[in-house]
């Protein structure tokens, strides 16, 4: 079976993690600032705060820009559910707007139409590692939190790396990501006071100069361990090769799938924006076999695939809580119903890509 994803863990990862294990300092140690500094340097961001996941990073970043109870945050319905959930943690409301059919990111015009006098922030998602149109969102004059969980390696048209524009931008390090620490996340940002707040709130509200028992604000345990940070430092050391390997696999896919009529394939670049390759998601042709049947038929051919991503507003929790219905965001719903993630990882071979492509062609051609 060709798996969907597979992390690359080498001898350097083992060496740095072992060093931490032998040091005896497994958490709140020197690897945390070391990883933060290395990550910020990679993105070209002034600062970074390591956190326990992309989700917890989103939560703290939303709090840091001032999102609170009763506020509205305009965001994309075509995302992993965590981006909208993080808004709910603060008793604010995620307000969805439709997506652009080419980039699959939040459409700035639709987002503008969704802004009300209760909107306190925008939460664009760089979906599948493709840069969201930050220039347009910046023109709204509202605070922005970027969900960059899938977007390490992505670059905006002006040459700035995703995460390097100064807004808090949140990366995720789950095992299928470009960089993994098993579980983990990072918030890149430019504002030192915001970093201080995030660093305090990830650590139970403790200020840097406080004793253990005196905490002056509400906090959480959203820390990332030194073990995880050591893994992240090692991954960063070979990030160029890891990203290049993903881009190479994507190139093989583009070639192998080019002649399937009606198949939506992901763009490496559009209008100067460059994708940081995370997943390889296609949209099955309209009028052909249903996407879920394609998943089953591919499995029978030894290929793992998955429906990815479902529209958030149509998930049962969001339907029940907010009364969302089909037809609200037609572009998102059409794309979500046809989206299929194919196996994609740095060590994937060209012959595996061809096997997947042949399987997909045969399945789409029908019985
Ligand atoms: C777009 C997006 N947002 C948020 C998250 C949440 O990150 P984590 O799983 O690290 O909490 C993910 C991770 O899968 C994601 O893909």
Image (cartoon, helix red, strand yellow):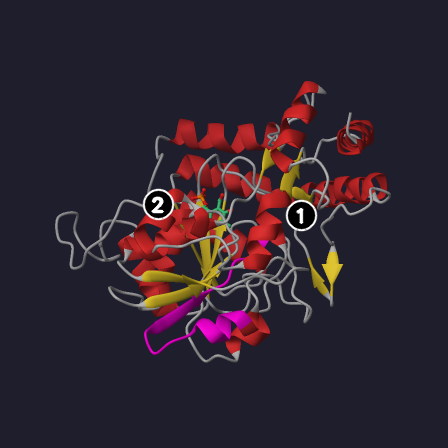
Percent across and percent down for residue 234 are: 57, 39
Task: Say left or right for 209 vs 339.
Answer: left
Tag 2 secondary structure = helix
Displayed quadrant of residue 168:
bottom left
Give the number of marks: 2
Q: Which mark is residue 277?
A: 1
Percent across and percent down for residue 111 are: 50, 70
The image shows residue 165, relative to residue 218, as above or below, that is: below
Q: Which mark is residue 188?
A: none
> Residue 226, can we see it?
yes
The verdict on residue 122 being magenta is yes
Name the residue carrying label 2: 317
> Residue 151, can we see it?
no
- Distance from mark 2 CB to nearest ligand 1 atom below 8 Å: no
* Disc 1 from disc 2: Cα separation: 30 Å
- Within 10 Å of disc 1 (Cα), the crowding (few <14, some 14-19, many 20+) is many
The span shown in magenta is: 110-127
N-terminal-most mark, 1 or 2 = 1
Residue at the image point whose x is 35% and y is 30% from the top: 24
The verdict on residue 351 being magenta is no
């Amino acid at each position: 079976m060709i798996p969907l994803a597979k992390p690359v863990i080498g001898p350097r990862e083992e060496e740095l993690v072992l060093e931490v294990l032998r040091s005896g300092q497994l958490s709140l140690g020197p690897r945390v600032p070391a990883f933060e500094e290395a990550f910020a340097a990679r993105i070209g961001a002034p600062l970074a705060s390591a956190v326990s996941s992309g989700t917890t990073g989103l939560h703290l970043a939303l709090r840091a820009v001032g999102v609170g109870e009763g506020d509205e945050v305009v965001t994309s319905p075509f995302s992993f559910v965590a981006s909208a959930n993080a808004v709910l943690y603060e008793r604010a409301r995620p307000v969805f707007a439709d997506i652009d059919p080419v980039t699959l990111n939040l459409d700035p015009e639709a987002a503008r139409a969704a802004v009300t006098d209760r909107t306190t922030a925008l939460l664009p998602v760089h979906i599948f590692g493709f840069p969201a149109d930050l220039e347009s969102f910046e023109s709204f004059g509202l605070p922005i939190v970027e969900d960059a969980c899938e977007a390490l390696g992505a670059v905006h048209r002006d040459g700035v790396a995703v995460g390097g524009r100064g807004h808090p931008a949140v990366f995720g390090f789950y095992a299928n990501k470009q960089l993994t620490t098993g579980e983990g996340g990072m918030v890149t940002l430019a504002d030192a006071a915001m970093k201080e707040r995030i660093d305090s709130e990830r650590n139970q509200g403790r200020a840097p100069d406080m004793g253990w028992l005196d905490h002056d604000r509400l906090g959480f345990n959203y820390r990332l361990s030194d073990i995880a940070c050591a893994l992240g430092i090692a991954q960063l050391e070979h990030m160029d090769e890891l990203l290049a390997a993903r881009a190479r696999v994507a190139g093989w896919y583009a070639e192998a799938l080019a002649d399937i009529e009606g198949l939506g394939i992901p763009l490496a670049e559009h209008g100067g924006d460059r994708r940081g390759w995370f997943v390889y998601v296609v949209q099955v042709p309209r009028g052909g076999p249903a996407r879920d049947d394609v998943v089953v038929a591919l499995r029978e051919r030894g290929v793992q695939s998955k429906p990815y991503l479902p529209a958030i507003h149509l998930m049962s929790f969001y339907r029940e809580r907010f009364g969302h219905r089909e037809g609200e965001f037609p572009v998102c719903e059409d794309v979500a119903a046809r989206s299929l993630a194919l196996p994609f990882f740095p060590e994937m071979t060209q012959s595996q890509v061809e096997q997947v492509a042949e399987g997909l062609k045969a399945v789409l051609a029908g019985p």
